[in-house]
Amino acid sequence: MFDPALSDGGELAEWLRRVFERTRSENQTDILGLIGSSRRDGDTARLTRAVFENLPGAGLIDLSAYDIAPYDYHYRQSHDDFIEIAQKMAQAKTIVFASPVYWYAMSAQMKLFFDRLTDLTETHKPIGKSLAGKTAFLIATGGSPSAPASFEPPFRETARYFNMNWGGMLYGQKGEARDKGMVKTFASNIAELSVAPYAIQEIA
């Protein structure tokens, strides 16, 4: 938890920016996207936003903008931002994970977040149980024409562990022209399961 009283001016300004942006985007959304990438405007973020442009009411969270500590068996990380995001997941109907392929697996940012899902099986079980019945999707990009066979299973099996439905994956090769038809079809699949009346919102 950030303490502005102990901060210099630069850190205080950054803290205020994050608080303002979160407050501005507090409307509940039925479709929630979680982007885990080292680049805010990389291939994965661009593909994800292209999908979400077809989903009025969807909300996007950039995991890199949040303070998420590694999993700790002694729960010393309980005051970071993980539960705030988990609560947004509990309010949504559909969760869309987005990650580039890093060494045949999900990004470090996404893996850190997935490790913390353990909290939802221990200290915050009601949130974990609330995920049952929701649907999870995956958006990914990588250097190969297709995702490694090992890439999708951790997302799919984690969703099933929480009794969520698995909606499938949209994959795009880096540097290749975006297939607008595939993007719209994927967005349509998401929209069929969840409809929200608000404007698209960026949750920092």
Image (cartoon, rainbow, N blue to C red):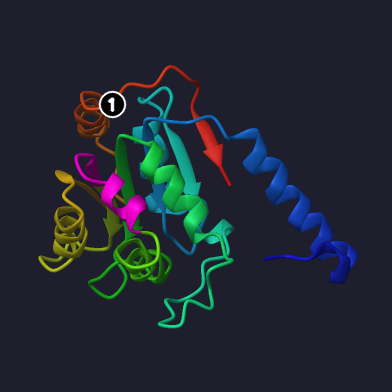
Residue furthest top in the image:
197
- Per the rendered image, the range of residues in magenta is 125-137
User: Considering the numbered disc 1 on the image, is that residue within a helix, a strand or a loop?
Assistant: loop
Seen in the image, is 201 located left or right of residue 31?
right
Give left or right: position of 10 versus 17: right
| Quarter of the rendering containing residue 144 | bottom left
Q: Residue 151 appears at what percent x and percent y? A: 18, 65
Residue plotted at (51% across, 73% down): 69
Q: Residue at x 53, y 32 (%)?
A: 201
Residue 53 quadrant: top left
**Picture coordinates of residue 127, whole percent (x, y):** 36, 51
The amino acid type of the residue labelled 1 equals Ser
Give the residue at x 45% y 54%: 42
Residue under pointer 1? 194
Report the front residue among 102 and 27.
Answer: 27
Q: Which of the image's four quarters has the N terminus?
A: bottom right
Q: Position of residue 3 (x, y in %)?
A: 78, 66
For disc 1, the neighbor class at 10 Å (few under 14, some 14 to 19, many from 20) is many
Residue at image coords 40%, 72%: 108
User: In terms of depth relative to the viewer, which is nearer, 27 or 125?
Assistant: 125
Residue 204 relative to residue 36: left or right: right
